[in-house]
């Protein structure tokens, strides 16, 4: 089933207690795409500047990522993010942001992508999310992400977007900020009242929670002891989750739970290296092996 993602594509500089990486490939749509391609081809929609390195384009061509929707804007510069992680590395500290091309008009969905059946609206202005969604004809599943900036400054626009999607993937702090509620089960119910049929609340090293009409399900994080760089973990989670749903063509409550397990495993590989380094050396067999280990760990007789 065709899967489309639209979101940021950037050049990152990251520092963690385990080292640093300068001017590496990043952005929400990138991490999503690479995780999703373990399960399904991806249609990428985004915009970069003319400074976007050819080496980064080469990396994209090595996966099943259709870049027809990747616009290179003459005279513009690519989005850049500089950040660092300290302590338990649960939260990124933004050191600097150059929006560059992201401060301009959004990208267009190519006509060839208009029949996409699953759409993930990675974090960007909620009005732009709706504009992009309107360019896709009757998708079967639509899911969005968001961030504290839009919750604080564009709440009404965000609520409009939530009213148009089937699912939302959001971290626990942002979910609490949006709803004004602390208990995550109640937070999830409040999110569903905004329109989505399901909400996935990411809890960092503590895993994720799925809330739907079927009830609440909590799934822990995969216990890796090799955390190098958490950048992109949440987007890799979303990519693995929706990539699995695209492969299975099954959106039932049971399939959503299986998809969250796949998202959890994808993010566990992402955090074991800087940028995409660990992901690029990971295979589908590696994913399957870790899924099997994880499900055995979760089984209680």
Image (spheres, rainbow, N blue to C red):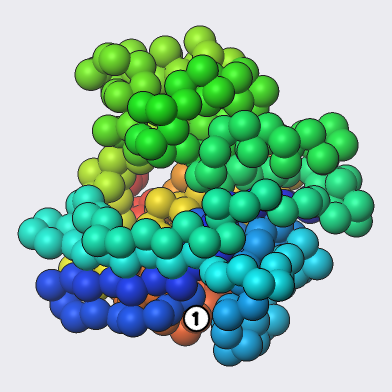
Q: Are there few (<14), some (14-19), or many (20+) residues within 10 Å of tag 1?
A: some
Front position in the image: 200 or 159:
159
Where residue 42 appears, as percent x and y from the top left, is 70, 61
Q: Which residue is mark 1?
A: 280
Visible residue check, residue 201? yes
Picture quarter with the C terminus: top left
Give the answer, above or below, for where 55 lies relative to 2: below
Residue at point 79%, 34% (across, down): 134
With 171 as the anchor, is 74 left or right in this view?
A: right
Please tell me whether mark 1 sits on a helix, a strand or a loop. Answer: helix
Where residue 31 appears, as percent x and y from the top left, is 50, 63
Give the answer, above or below, for where 282 lies relative to 218: below
Residue at point 81%, 47% (across, down): 116
Where residue 240 appears, as percent x and y from the top left, is 53, 55
Front position in the image: 208 or 20:
20
Visible residue check, residue 209? no
Give the answer, above or below, for where 26 lies relative to 192: below
With 11 as the anchor, is 164 left or right in this view?
A: right
Give the answer, above or below, for where 128 lies relative to 37: above
Q: Report the residue that reaches farthest toward the left.
A: 87
Residue at point 36%, 27% (across, down): 152
Where residue 274 appears, as percent x and y from the top left, is 33, 76
Q: Report the residue that reaches farthest toward the right.
A: 111
- Quarter-of-image position of residue 69: bottom right
Residue at point 22%, 55% (across, down): 93
């Amino acid at each position: 089933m065709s899967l489309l993602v639209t979101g940021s594509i950037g050049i990152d500089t990251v520092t963690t207690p385990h080292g640093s990486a300068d001017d590496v490939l990043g952005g929400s749509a990138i991490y999503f795409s690479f995780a999703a391609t373990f399960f399904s081809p991806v249609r990428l929609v985004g915009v970069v500047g003319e400074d976007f390195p050819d080496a980064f384009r080469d990396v994209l061509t090595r996966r099943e990522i259709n870049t027809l929707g990747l616009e290179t804007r003459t005279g513009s510069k690519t989005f850049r993010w500089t950040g660092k992680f300290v302590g338990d590395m649960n939260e990124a500290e933004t050191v600097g942001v150059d929006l560059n091309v992201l401060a301009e008009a959004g990208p267009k969905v190519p006509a060839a992508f208009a029949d996409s059946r699953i759409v993930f609206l990675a974090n960007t202005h909620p009005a732009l999310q709706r504009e992009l969604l309107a360019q896709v004809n009757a998708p079967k599943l639509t899911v969005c992400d968001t961030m504290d900036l839009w919750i604080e400054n564009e709440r009404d626009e965000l609520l409009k977007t939530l009213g148009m999607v089937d699912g939302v993937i959001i971290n626990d702090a942002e979910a609490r900020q949006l709803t004004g509620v602390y208990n995550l089960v109640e937070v999830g119910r409040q999110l569903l009242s905004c329109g989505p049929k399901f909400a996935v609340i990411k809890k960092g090293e503590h895993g994720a929670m799925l809330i739907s009409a079927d009830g609440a399900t909590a799934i822990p994080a995969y216990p890796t002891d090799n955390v190098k760089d958490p950048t992109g973990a949440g987007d890799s989670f979303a990519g693995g989750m929706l990539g699995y749903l695209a492969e299975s063509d099954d959106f039932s409550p049971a399939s959503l739970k299986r998809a969250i397990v796949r998202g959890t495993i994808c993010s566990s590989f992402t955090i074991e290296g800087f940028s995409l380094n660990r992901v690029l050396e990971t295979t589908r067999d590696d994913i399957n092996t870790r899924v099997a280990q994880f499900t055995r760990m979760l089984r209680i007789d």
